[in-house]
């Protein structure tokens, strides 16, 4: 009897357990609607839409970054208006150079001390010794022969002498017209920009690109300053603002000659009008760096002839810039000067000195920090600005 009792008890426990399991499964089925895999919540972008995703072999979701917005392409200011701004800014700066010259020349009787004071003013303005002597000698002769004494007439004489020193007869146009090769192919004009550290070469290249774009030229930039990591980024930013492509290396310390060569080749392939090549700043007394600059020039000319070699000089350095100009001229054959930081300087006579030193003209001047503060150099506008007219 006791055995039958235990059998019935065991059967009851089994039945109760089976019933409990069935009830539990039924409840789960009603709640979940079947077996499922838990999905991670979608990642949303700023506008609330889920970004596209791609799956790896392991099934992990990889969220692709949203495509960047297309940058707004600027339209640079026309070049013509910049010439007027140059004269206005020089005049507003109240050039102590021009003011001192006019003050002395307007005196009733000019003594030798007065002429010495004039020559000193010219030297301080970095006109240079020989040019200063010539100007003083010419003024002395004209004042004595013509008997000029009133300030207006003296000012006219001074203006004419200064304009003659700056030499308006020099060709200051930029050679940016594409060439035709012997095989009939069109080659872009190539402009190489050189100079020492801190003169503003990269900024000048960016501003020059804006000048050319304002003239409806197709431009390619070459970031051959591979020693300064920020230089290529800076140049690329300048180019992007006006829709101009930049050829650069994907690593620091790359061969700058190779980057320059690739930029010129890209210009040929794209049918560009002009290729602007930026280079690293280098001291003129570093033979290795100057030799490298010569290499850049040689490599570029294997792809297309050089149209311009522009030397960027800081106008505030004065006579110190002449030694730089001399060495760069010997190594790469400078064809034109770009004077930066000219606005407001009392040392504008460097224009005369550097032209005499190299025998090449100042072609462009930097007027300030604005993106369109680069203008073609115009001798009469420059002199009138210095004299405050």
Image (cartoon, grey):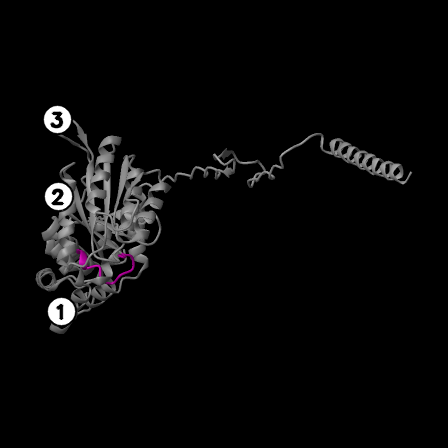
* Disc 2 from disc 3: Cα separation: 21 Å
Q: Under tag 1, what secondary structure?
A: helix
Q: Is residue 324 magenta?
A: no
Q: Residues within 10 Å of mark 3 (few under 14, many from 20)?
A: few
Q: Position of residue 301 (x, y in %)?
A: 14, 39
Q: Position of residue 159 (x, y in %)?
A: 18, 56
User: Residue 48: which disc?
Assistant: none
User: Residue 115: which disc?
Assistant: 1
User: Residue 298: which disc?
Assistant: 2
Please state the extent of the stretch shown in magenta in the rendering: 341-351
**Figure label count:** 3
Depth order, front residue of 78/301: 301
Q: Is tag 2's residue or tag 3's residue first in the polypeptide sequence?
A: 3
* Disc 1 from disc 3: Cα separation: 61 Å
Q: Quadrant of residue 117?
A: bottom left
Using the rendered image of the protein, determine whether residue 341 is visible from the camera's viewpoint: yes
Q: Position of residue 121 (x, y in %)?
A: 18, 67
Q: Mark 2 or mark 3, which is nearer to you? A: 2
Q: Is residue 342 magenta?
A: yes
Q: Residue furthest bottom?
A: 113
Left or right of 119: which side holds 238? right
Vertical placement of residue 60 versus 324, above or below: above
Residue located beneath label 3 in the image: 183
Q: Under tag 2, what secondary structure?
A: helix
- What residue do we see at 29% from left, 48% from top? 374
Left or right of 259: which side holds 301? left
Q: Main secondary structure of the magenta part?
A: loop
Vertical placement of residue 355 versus 304, above or below: below
Q: Mark 2 or mark 1, which is nearer to you? A: 2
Q: Quadrant of residue 386?
A: bottom left
Q: Is tag 1's residue or tag 3's residue first in the polypeptide sequence?
A: 1
């Amino acid at each position: 009897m006791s055995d039958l009792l235990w059998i019935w008890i065991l059967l009851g426990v089994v039945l109760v357990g089976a019933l409990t399991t069935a009830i539990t499964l039924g409840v789960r089925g009603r709640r979940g609607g079947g077996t499922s895999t838990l999905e991670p919540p979608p990642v949303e972008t700023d506008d609330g839409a889920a970004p596209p995703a791609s799956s790896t072999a392991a099934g992990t979701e990889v969220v692709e970054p949203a495509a960047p917005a297309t940058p707004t392409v600027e339209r640079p200011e026309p070049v013509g208006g910049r010439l007027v701004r140059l004269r206005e800014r020089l005049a507003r700066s109240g050039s102590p150079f021009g003011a001192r010259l006019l003050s002395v020349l307007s005196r009733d009787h000019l003594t030798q001390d007065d002429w010495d004071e004039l020559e000193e003013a010219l030297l301080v303005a970095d006109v240079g010794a020989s040019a200063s002597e010539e100007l003083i000698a010419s003024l002395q002769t004209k004042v004595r022969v013509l008997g000029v004494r009133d300030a207006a007439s003296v000012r006219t004489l001074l203006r004419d002498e200064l304009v003659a020193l700056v030499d308006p007869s020099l060709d200051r146009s930029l050679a940016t017209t594409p060439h035709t090769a012997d095989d009939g192919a069109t080659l872009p004009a190539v402009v190489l920009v050189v100079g020492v550290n801190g003169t503003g070469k990269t900024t000048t290249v960016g501003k020059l690109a804006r000048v050319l774009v304002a003239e409806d030229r197709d431009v390619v930039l070459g970031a051959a300053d591979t020693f300064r990591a920020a230089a290529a980024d800076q140049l690329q930013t300048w180019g992007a603002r006006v829709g101009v492509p930049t050829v650069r290396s994907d690593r620091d310390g790359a061969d700058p000659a190779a980057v320059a060569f690739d930029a010129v080749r890209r210009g040929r392939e794209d049918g560009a009008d002009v290729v602007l090549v930026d280079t690293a700043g280098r001291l003129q007394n570093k033979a290795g760096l100057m030799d490298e600059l010569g290499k850049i020039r040689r490599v570029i000319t294997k792809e297309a002839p050089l149209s311009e070699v522009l030397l960027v000089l800081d106008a505030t350095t004065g006579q110190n810039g002449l030694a730089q100009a001399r060495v760069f001229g010997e190594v790469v054959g400078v064809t034109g000067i770009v004077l930066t930081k000219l606005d407001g300087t009392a040392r504008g006579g460097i224009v005369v000195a550097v032209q005499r030193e190299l025998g090449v003209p100042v072609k462009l001047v930097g007027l300030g920090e604005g993106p369109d503060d680069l203008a073609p150099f115009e001798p009469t506008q420059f002199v009138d600005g210095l004299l405050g007219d």
